[in-house]
Amino acid sequence: MGAGPTGSAFALLLARAGVAVELVESQPRHSALIRGDGLMPSGLEALNRMGLASLLARLPRRELRGWSFLLEGRSLFSVAEPFGGSVPCSLIDTPGLLEGMLEQALACPNLTLRRGRAVKELLLKPEDTLPGSEGPARVAGVVLDDGTQLPAELVVGCDGRGSTIRRLAALELEENNPPLEVLWFELENEAAAHLQPWIAGRFATLIGNAGSYALFGTARGGVRLGWLQERGAVGSPVPWPERWARSAPPELAALWRSLPTTSVGPPLRLSVRSGLAPRWQRPGLLLLGDAAHPMSPLRAQGLNMALRDALVAAERLLPLLCGEGGGGGDGLPSTDADLMGPGPLGSGQGDPHPAAAGLIGANPVGTDKPAPHPPAPARAAEEPPQRREFEEQLDQALVAIAEARLPEIRAVQALQRQELGRGELLRRQAWLRRLLAATAPVSGPLLSRRWQAGQPTLRTGLPLPEGPP
């Protein structure tokens, strides 16, 4: 998943500024279903600062009209968009966004995209050590599954929640995973048109005795449904439309029961996995996106945090990679100040810096303990002081990126856990659902205010740094 939201955005920002980038993606094409579609104001802010507003304007996009919560087939409360600000949440064509970013990146002569290739090993700088750690020494590139060696000044793992780069770098992931999974269903054509009048542009959450699910229309006119269940739950002989109808209000239940069962294909199964790597970096290596902090699918945070990771990392690294933070000479980035060019995040094109960065993303290629890391191609025994200075500055920048992003990630994940916990309480306690449904005129407004109180950070995030430090 290296060419997912984090990898595609980060590769574009670096390549657009003239940095030489190798983008490695293990999958031959994007999967439309598993990408998050929800664009929060936080993600929109990041895209605007990347200079990608025009790309976003060309994509299919649907602004949400509101959020609805239903218990036992009764409306508990609804909240109209936008609230707490002037920018509504919206649903976008995420594969289209990724393709657009890659198209712009590939227009840069200094970017190479390698599809269908996975990372097998890390290249290490042989003379380095990492005192007090069992992890790898300085990372100096990667080895692909076909044996290709890609030396690099920097390896960035944007390869998702099952990150191979994280495993190879021996970076710990602290997980807090509930024993839940989401079954994602995609309804299109006549089935989607059948449901759109009831959905009416809302994101609806329904919890009842038969189960719980989220329902919303996609940017391209389809309908997506996420069914929440215990991980590894045994299937039911009851057809899916009938199961959904049993937790729905009468009008929606009638629509479900009139839907041909043949219009519902098999779901995609996704574990509700979340966690945080306390440390995102090794010398010469950085984790971003779900590789550093797997996000729960609740309240559409994965895409938005990925874009913000890419923005902050690029703003911190570009001055150094483009020669403003370290001396040149002997293969180091040039010191010419004009290589960044004008526009957002150095959108001008300059001469590419040779081997300045390797942006690596690949799905896991196995869970066996990795073989000993091969050394990087031999370097001179005595390296110039400029190179040592550059590497020290680079490693300091990697630490600064993680420090800049950790407060927001921690805050967002804490709010996700709270909201998921409340939903699980309702899913498991039938008496509580019935009580709240029966007293909805009173309990609904109270719960609405409590729900809205936790949303500002999930919508807008924490304030981003103003720009490069």
Image: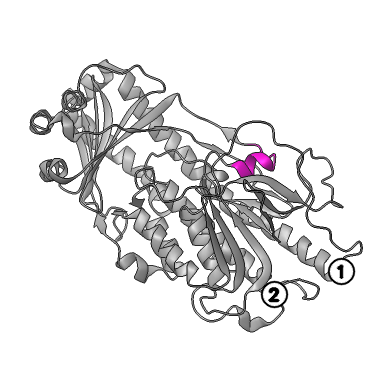
Q: Position of residue 182 (x, y in %)?
A: 36, 31
Q: Distance between the residues labelled 1 and 2?
A: 15 Å
Label 1 secondary element: helix
Label 2 secondary element: loop
Q: Position of residue 240 (x, y in %)?
A: 21, 26
Q: What stretch is highlighted in magenta?
A: 164-172
Is residue 41 at all visible to an observer of this figure? yes
Q: Nearer the viewer, residue 187 or 336?
A: 187
Amino acid beneath label 2: Gly
Residue at the image point whose x is 58% and y is 48% from the top = 406
**Residue 4 vertical position relative to residue 177 in the rendered view, above or below:** below
Q: In this view, does 382 lie to the left or right of 366?
A: right
Residue at the image point whose x is 35% and y is 23% from the top = 425
Give yes or no for residue 168 being in the magenta stretch. Answer: yes
Amino acid beneath label 1: Pro
Considering every residue shown, the one lying at the far right of the view is 382
Which residue is labeled 1 in the image? 385
Q: Position of residue 267 (x, y in %)?
A: 31, 33
How packed mark 1 is, by other alpha carbons closer than 10 Å (few <14, some 14-19, many 20 or more), is: few
Check residue 323 in the rendering and tell me which mark sits there, or answer none: 2
Residue at the image point whose x is 36% and y is 25% from the top = 424
Instruction: Classify the position of the C terminus by image quarter.
Output: bottom right
Which color scheme did the rendering employ for the protein?
one colour
